[in-house]
Image: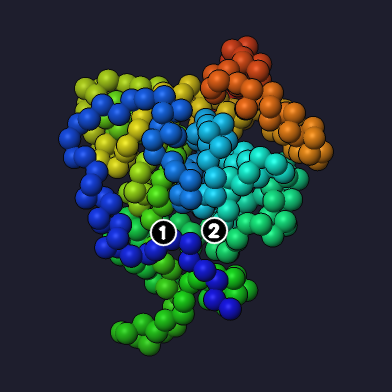
Amino acid sequence: MTAPLFTSPSSEDARTAFAAKPRGLVDKVMSVAEAVSRFIRDGDYLATGGFGTNRIPAAVCHEILRQRKQHLGFSGHTATHDFQILCAGNLTGRGQTIAKVDAAYIVGLEARGLSPHSRRVLESGTVQCVEWSNYTLALRYTAAAMGVPFVPARSLLGTDTLANCPAKIITCPFTGEKLAAIPALYPDVAAIHVHEADRYGNCRFIGTSVADIDLARASKRVIITCERLVPHDQMRLNPHRTQIPFLCVDAVCEVPFGSYPGNMPGEYFSDEDHMKLWLEVEKDQSAFAQFLDDHIFGVNDFAEYLDRCGGLKRLQALRQRELLLHLGK
């Protein structure tokens, strides 16, 4: 049985959406609540930026839960804590935030262990799931950023991943070689956290980019959260440092510590104690429900969540730890 494609790889369909985006320098600054309300709809296909717990758009994921967005598709391209947050919306009696997943790396939080609740959600059979490698899921963004419906690759050939994957084997018209056709992925909306952005949506960040540069160009709508807003004139002084241009972006939200409890290169270290707490409370569904009420549903915004997690004193300690690591101490 052929695994399903959750989104159309048609470059023509995507071009129609891209053509409707504004080309001028429009002020796009808004709150996370407004961005999620305006640009994420029930049934949308969502992709998040970052990698592992590095530079994740945690504030957007929280707001998706608070606004009870339902039946989302999701690109699990090494999605750890962000996927863990979104799966919390699939808790019994609270609806179904996640309905289908293109999975490369999910459920695991790397060396920290597996998310008990994310595992329950995936094993429940209520979420459709197809498989990719990290590389081929990234290639899907590459194809979309190029504006083509697929790219050829050797990856996946000779692996069991193909048994639950929509990629197709094709023959090269020039050499006769067997290749895998990796279909383009055009998410309805992407959420990406960066270090700096101006009010029009020009963005820059440090550290590994992984697939985010292609993701921003592949997605029909893009929500940017940033550690800080910078003046447009300052961004123009070093235009070569702009990795994501304003043409791709629909919303800009200033969210200091917006990757918490994940890390932000050069800014702050991950809060390992808090991520350990998530993993612990997930073991018991009633305890997890109370935790979510206390930390997400019972707060107004991400800033209040940070206060619940130790506030400025805790955040300063994480910033100091990141600084010491950069100094080699």
* Furthest-bottom residue in this view: 176
Q: Position of residue 106 (x, y in %)?
A: 62, 51
- Is residue 27 or residue 55 the one in the foreground? 27
Residue located 35% across and 33% down the image: 251
The residue to which callout 2 is attached is 102
- Is residue 175 or residue 150 the one in the foreground? 150
Count neighbours of disc 1 (C-alpha within 10 A) and say few if under 14, some if 14 to 19, many if 20 or more: many
Q: Position of residue 82 (x, y in %)?
A: 58, 40
Question: Mark 1 and 2 residues: CB-CB less than 8 Å, in contact?
Answer: yes
Which badge, 1 or 2, comes first in the chain's sequence?
2
Residue located 39% across and 63% down the image: 8
- Is residue 190 or residue 266 the one in the foreground? 190
The residue to which callout 1 is attached is 185
Residue located 48% across and 72% down the image: 167
Q: Is residue 179 visible?
A: yes
Residue located 54% across and 76% down the image: 2
* For residue 95, above or below residue 4: above
